[in-house]
Image: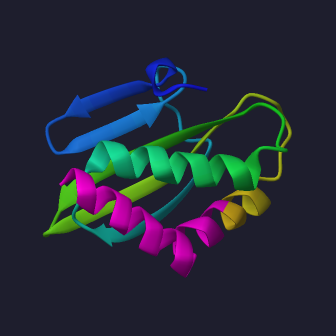
Amino acid sequence: MSRARWHVLREGPVLTLARALPPRFDVVAETWLPGGGRARLAHQIRQDIWRAVQHQRGFSPVVQIACRDGGLAVRAGGRVSVRPFDRDGIEARIADVLEHKKCRARWIRCAGRAA
């Protein structure tokens, strides 16, 4: 899927990347990263979240990145259009991705090139 099919909303210090509008967080996990290119970072995180949760029917990723305190506050998750679903399990998988050391290092490298 190309980047052109994703909605990128910029509202001041907040960038939101979503497949469908309005963006909705049925599941969410959060982390903090050092500064860098928000759009590039959002796409990288979205790809890794998708890989971890792609088997969840009806899942559509949403990544929101806000500039705060010299870094980036990241909310990642998305909408799940199928009910019922395992909210805790999906949020745990997303949190694992957000805290994975190799993923974080790659995101920071990639986002740094766009800074």
34 or 24: nearer the viewer? 34
Residue 96 as seen in the image, left or right of residue 106: right
Spot the residue most to the front. Answer: 113
Q: Quadrant of the C terminus?
A: bottom left
Quarter residue 52 falls in? bottom right
Q: Is residue 41 magenta?
A: no
Residue at 16% in and 45% down: 13
Residue 54 as seen in the image, left or right of residue 78: right
41 or 71: nearer the viewer? 41
Spot the residue most to the bottom. Answer: 101
For the record, the magenta segment spans: 94-115
Quarter residue 96 falls in? bottom right
Residue 88 position in % (x across, y down): 74, 61
Residue at 78% in and 62% down: 89
Residue at 53% in and 67% down: 98
Residue 58 as seen in the image, left or right of residue 106: right
- Rendered image coloring scheme: rainbow
User: Considering only vertical position in the picture, is 40 above or below 115?
Assistant: above
Residue 69 as seen in the image, left or right of residue 60: left
User: Considering only vertical position in the picture, is 22 above or below 57?
Assistant: above
Residue at 54% in and 76% down: 102
Q: Quadrant of the N terminus?
A: top right
3 or 20: nearer the viewer? 3
Residue 41 position in % (x across, y down): 38, 52
- The main secondary structure of the magenta stretch is helix
Residue 16 position in % (x across, y down): 36, 37
